[in-house]
């Protein structure tokens, strides 16, 4: 981050709150304005963290605003899901009102569509002051006369630009009354067709749409366009700081123009931009996500392979992990792509200190301890390395040990390569975590030559202590007698590296990674049978895991998602 620890958005707000500042003694009000036309993804999470985070930091509030000014694409289904996802992400901010059972946003969620009448009145005000006109050019003419293009041509005034105020008022009312066809007319701001900023060349404010709107029904035939609507929505709500992504940087002049030229807007918000979060390999386009879900390439919007908010939630990432990621990426005024390894590192750092250590074997190989006939309990094993079982007895667990155990197939190699220090040659040794050193005595194969079992002896002087004279490699294991069957899902990137755009004739779906979810028939230690949704585990030597929803919904099935593997450098 910056040397004094504050990013440019924080400096901006602090300057406004200072004694001579614009918002002195005023409460900061930000907003998070999703369009209810899809599920939220990892990029939105960053915007949530920024908007709710800044409001929280400066003692203000944040509106959850559904930006539902486009009647064609919005659906009520998304409104519910978005509220759930925003509330979940905001848990990381530990807001007092949320701890008391409230929602993170100010009052109730708000809807841009509730302002249609006010915005219409603002438009009338601009018309009356000669600052907006009804244009009857065809869409093709409008486009052509904007100028720009490769030769950066100046725009050309519409033949309708000098209509009288009375005529504009009459035509705009007729547009709203449904007397004119869709596409036949636009209400445009009267700014400057030769303006160097294309966005200022008489931008459209209203278009005619006869679609049914999910909230206002068929009441409106004219719908405000984003650049006109957004600043008005902010002004109506009394937003003090309107934070958006960099694509809107050269729309800011227009944002300001509308607010400065309308004589009846109730407040004067200001806009600032930051770089959107682009995660390497993340598919976040609504069209693509919809295809993945609707065509069954994933199990739903919460499939743990997806980087939707509900996908990463199901995978086992915590809101605190998302906050760590957002803070780690930081606030920038330059676009960049964040490597997925960085995102994983943030999630891992979040889980490392709170994940209970457990033993799980993903690809089991049976081991018989030929010189061990008893059964014993290994007690007082703590959930976390730094805990002491005596001070926190509730954090202690018990493992059982018997003649028959399972180890990982990969911890035995028939033809061990150089530097392989696990079971290989007859006489090779490993240390079982929390238990004994065992030594390979015999390899049992079936008729096809496949290794089905190892026979080992044990060193009874080594239970949970390293021998003094040698330091065998420590491996994980489970007791065959009481371990549980579980499905362990290794989550990998959903897509193989793909060119952007994908080559002609190829579909993005052809780049789906067939190994994106590897399902292992695992054997896990007994203590995992009573896990709860909030639990996070480090399966030793394997990574960080969370119980999947399938553990808790009928028919219950013990299953775990790998949130992230262990750090590459970690001792495996
Ligand atoms: P579309 O424009 O395709 O509908 P969108 O990603 O802009 O998609 P919105 O619902 O408009 O979706 O986004 C809501 C808010 O989230 C906006 O303020 C937007 O700037 C912000 N946002 C969206 N994507 C990102 C991202 N990748 N990084 C940071 N903020 C984002
Ligand atoms: Mg959108
Ligand atoms: Mg958008």
Image (spheres, rainbow, N blue to C red):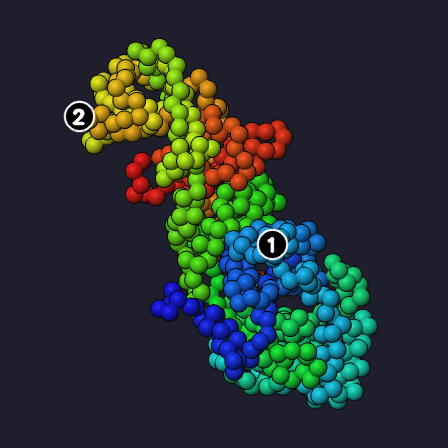
- Direction from residue 265 to residue 269 in the image, left or right: left
Q: From this view, report whether residue 395 is shown above or below residue 428.
A: below
Residue at image position (59%, 33%) is: 552
Q: Which quadrant would residue 373 be assigned to in this image?
A: top left
Q: Residues within 10 Å of mark 1 (few under 14, many from 20)?
A: some
- The picture quadrant for ligand 1 comes to bottom right
Q: Which quarter shows the N terminus?
A: bottom left
Residue at image position (40%, 28%) is: 380
CB at mark 1 closer than 8 A to ligand 1?
A: no
Q: Which quarter shows the C terminus?
A: top left
Residue ID for mark 1? 98
Q: From this view, report whether residue 566 is shown above or below residue 360.
A: below
Residue at image position (52%, 56%) is: 93
Residue ID for mark 2? 469
Residue 251 is marked as none
- Direction from residue 179 to residue 97 in the image, left or right: left
Q: Residues within 10 Å of mark 2 (few under 14, many from 20)?
A: few
x and y, in percent, of residue 231 in the image: 62, 74
Residue 200 in view here: yes
Q: In this view of the protein, which residue sits in the foreground, 298 or 554? A: 554
Residue 478 in view here: no
x and y, in percent, of residue 81 in the image: 64, 51
x and y, in percent, of residue 496 in the image: 43, 46
User: Which SS class for mark 1?
Assistant: helix
x and y, in percent, of residue 276 in the image: 48, 63
Q: From this view, report whether residue 339 is shown above or below residue 188.
A: above
Q: CA distance from mark 2 to mark 1?
A: 57 Å
Residue at image position (76%, 65%) is: 210
- Direction from residue 492 to residue 298 in the image, left or right: right
């Amino acid at each position: 981050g910056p040397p004094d620890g504050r990013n440019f958005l924080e400096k901006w707000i602090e300057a406004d709150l200072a004694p001579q500042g614009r918002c002195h003694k005023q409460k900061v009000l930000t907003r998070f304005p999703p369009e209810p036309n899809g599920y939220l993804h990892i990029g939105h999470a960053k915007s949530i963290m920024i908007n709710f985070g800044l409001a929280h930091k400066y003692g203000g509030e944040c509106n959850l605003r559904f930006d539902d000014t486009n009647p064609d694409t919005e659906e009520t289904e998304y409104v519910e899901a978005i509220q759930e996802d925003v509330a979940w992400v905001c848990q990381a901010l530990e807001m007092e009102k949320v701890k008391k059972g409230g929602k993170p946003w100010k009052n109730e969620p708000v809807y841009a569509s509730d302002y249609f009448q006010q915005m219409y009145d603002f438009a009338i005000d601009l018309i009356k002051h000669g600052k907006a006109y009804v244009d009857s050019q065809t869409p093709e003419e409008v486009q052509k006369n904007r100028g720009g293009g490769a030769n950066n041509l100046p725009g050309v005034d519409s033949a309708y630009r000098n209509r009288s105020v009375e005529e504009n008022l009459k035509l705009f009312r007729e547009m709203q009354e449904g007397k004119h066809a869709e596409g036949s007319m636009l209400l445009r701001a009267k700014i400057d067709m030769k303006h160097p900023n294309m966005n200022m060349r008489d931008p459209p404010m209203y278009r005619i749409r006869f679609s049914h709107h999910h909230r206002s029904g068929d009441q409106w035939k004219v719908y405000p366009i984003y650049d006109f609507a957004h600043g008005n929505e902010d002004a109506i709500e009394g937003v003090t700081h309107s934070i958006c992504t960099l694509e809107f940087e050269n729309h800011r002049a227009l944002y300001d123009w509308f607010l400065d030229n309308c004589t009846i807007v109730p407040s004067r918000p200001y806009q600032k931009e930051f770089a959107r979060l682009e995660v390497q390999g993340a598919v976040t386009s609504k069209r693509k996500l919809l295809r993945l879900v609707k065509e069954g390439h994933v199990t739903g919007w919460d499939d743990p392979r997806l980087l939707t908010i509900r996908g990463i939630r199901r995978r086992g990432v915590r809101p605190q992990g998302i906050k760590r990621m957002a803070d780690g990426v930081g606030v920038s005024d330059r676009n960049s792509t964040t490597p997925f390894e960085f995102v994983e590192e943030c999630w891992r750092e979040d889980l490392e200190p709170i994940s209970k250590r457990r033993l799980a074997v993903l690809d089991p190989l049976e081991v018989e301890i030929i010189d061990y006939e008893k059964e014993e309990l290994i007690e007082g094993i703590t959930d976390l390395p730094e805990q002491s079982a005596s001070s926190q007895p509730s954090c202690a667990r018990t493992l059982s040990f018997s003649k028959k155990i399972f180890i990982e197939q990969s911890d035995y190699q028939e033809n061990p390569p150089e530097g392989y220090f696990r079971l290989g040659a007859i006489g090779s040794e490993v240390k079982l975590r929390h238990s004994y050193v065992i030594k390979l005595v015999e390899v049992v194969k079936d008729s096809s030559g496949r290794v089905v079992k190892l026979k080992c002896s044990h060193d009874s002087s080594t239970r949970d202590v390293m021998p003094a004279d040698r330091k065998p490699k420590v491996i994980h294991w489970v007791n065959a007698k009481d371990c549980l069957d579980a499905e362990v899902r290794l989550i990998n990137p959903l897509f193989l590296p793909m060119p952007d755009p994908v080559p002609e004739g190829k579909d993005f779906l052809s780049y789906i990674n067939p190994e994106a979810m590897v399902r292992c028939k695992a054997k896990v230690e007994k203590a995992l049978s009573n896990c709860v949704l909030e639990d996070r585990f480090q399966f030793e030597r394997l990574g960080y895991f969370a119980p999947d929803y399938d553990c808790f919904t009928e028919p219950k099935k013990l299953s775990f998602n790998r949130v992230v593997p262990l750090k590459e450098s970690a001792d495996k």
